[in-house]
Structure formats: C-alpha cells, structure tokens
Image: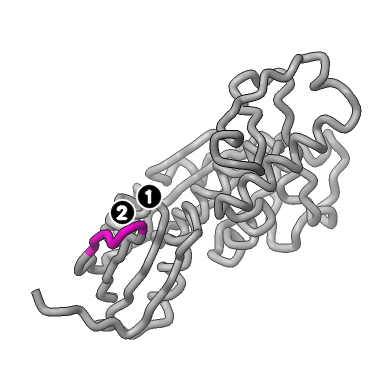
Amino acid sequence: MTTLQEDKLLDCSGMLCPVPVIKTSKAIKEMQVGQVLKMISTDAGAPPDMVAWARQTGNELLDSHQEGKQYIFYFRKLK
Amino acid sequence: MSKSDPNAPKRLAIIASKGTLDWAYPPLILASAGAAMGWDVSIFHTFYGLTLLLKDIKAEVTPLGNPAMPMTMPFGPEAFQKIDWPIPTAMMSTPGFNAMATGMMKKLFHDKGVASVPEMRAMCVEAGVNMIACQMTMSVFGFQKEDFIPECTVGGAGMFLDYAADAEVQLFV
C-alpha cells in the first residue's frame, strides 16, 4: 500500500464522543475537494462513528487503522 | 434528504424535556453529531429541558431517586475510582449533597475528556442547530425570551410537529 500523505492533520486525542465527529466535520469544511485529512483519536467509539460520518457526509474514508491507543483515519474530501 | 424533499439534508427532531446535568447531555450530543453529519437539526426544549437554554446553565445531578447512578470518586487510584459507594438515601437529602454530586460528575466528565454542557450547547449553536423554546412552558414557569441565549427561537407543539413530520429521526429525551 502506498503511504497516504495528508494535507491537514487533526489530533483529537483525549476527546470523547461527539467531539471527534464535530472537529472532523469542521476541519474538512475548511479544505478543498480532493484534499486528504488525517485524524487521530483515542476514543474507542471513534471507528464506527467515523465510518458513519463518512457515509452520511459523502466523504471518502481512505484508510483507518489502530496504532497502540490511537485510531488513525484518512479522509478524502469529495464534496 | 428529508422525507418530502430528496434534495434537502436529512432531518433530526429532538425533544429535550429534562434539565439535570446527566440528561442535558443526550440531546446536545445527538444534535451536534447530527449537525456534523450535515443534517438539519432542531431541539424542542420543553418543561425542564427549557433550562438548558438559560444564558447560565445551572444543571445539577443527584443520585436521590436515581439508584442506577454510579456513586464513584473521580480521584485516587484506578481501583479506588471503580468502587460504587453505597450512599444511604437519607444522606442524599442533606444540604449540599446535590452540589457535591454535581461537582463530582463534572470532574469525572472533564477528566475523561467529555465536553461540558455549556461547551456542548455552544457547539450545537455554532453548527446551526435550531434551538426552540416551548412557549407554553415559558409562560407556565415565567421565563422570558431574554432569559435565554439569543440564538434560540420560540415555538409550540404545532410548529415542532410540522418540522418533525418531515424528519427521518425523531427522539424524545
């Protein structure tokens, strides 16, 4: 897999639901279509929430994986 | 899409009927999450939920009459924090107990990384959630529009049902 390069990094470490969803939504609004957002969360509820957020907002979840206590997400802004 | 307009965003209609610190969270969390997903969201604040619109939210919590509420300490070693203390009901009605329980819950939530109720409400307002104050309850309890945050609107059951009829998700909290 080629390494994803983000245009913007959002660190939501230490924040619980629904703040990662809100901050991701805010961050992507300030980006251009096609750009990639990397979001880091330590909330165990983030993986299903972020999949749902991507589906509901029509943005693409390029990758999500866990590194230790961190959940890492890459989204591409589609609209 | 809303039910009747395929081009409109999805709709979430919430009734917030409770004004304690614990019950302040669910409507505000769901509303802000819905708005973050691009949905059109309204919260109808009625009865005690109206107090969540006051400029200065004074929401408290008590374990009195609420036996499911864990009475744990928000400090000390992890094993200590997991102890659910058996507080006698009579003690729960002593002066200052509500304030103590409220302070402990606020500290616990803050330490775990949960936003405060005023912060959650600010996020809702910023995200464009329509905060509606129930006119009937305002009249009954003697609240004025000026008592509330300026972003709120005032309406009644008919107005809310008209909105909710076109919403995919309708919740009573």
Which residue is disc 1 drawn over? A44
Specify few, some or many for label 2: CA neighbours under 10 Å numbering under 14, 14-19, or 20 or more: some
Front residue of this view, candidates A4 and A59: A4
Q: Residue at left 53%, top 42%? A: B14
Q: Position of residue A3 (x, y in %)?
A: 16, 79
- Depth check, front residue: B24 or A56: B24
Which residue appears at 67% of the width and 34% of the height? B18
Callout 1, which amino acid? Ala
Question: Where does label 2 land, which residue?
Answer: A47
Contact, CB < 8 Å: mark 2 with mark 1?
yes
User: Mark 1: which secondary structure?
Assistant: loop
Quarter occupied by residue B99: top right
Mark toward the viewer: 2 or 1:
1
Q: Chain of mark 2?
A: A
Determine the residue positioned at 80% across, 36% down.
B100
Q: Mark 1 — on which chain does it sit?
A: A
| Helix, strand or loop under label 2 | helix
- Residue A31 point in image, percent of width and height: 37, 83
Q: Tell me where residue A49 appears, x and y as whole percent.
A: 35, 52
Residue extent of the magenta highlight: A64-69
Please state, as top left, top right, bottom left or bottom right, where the N terminus of chain B lies in the image. Answer: bottom left
Q: Position of residue A14 (x, y in %)?
A: 50, 59
Between residue B75 and residue A22, name the one nearer to us: B75
**Which mark is drawn over residue B76?**
none
B14 vs A79: above or below? above
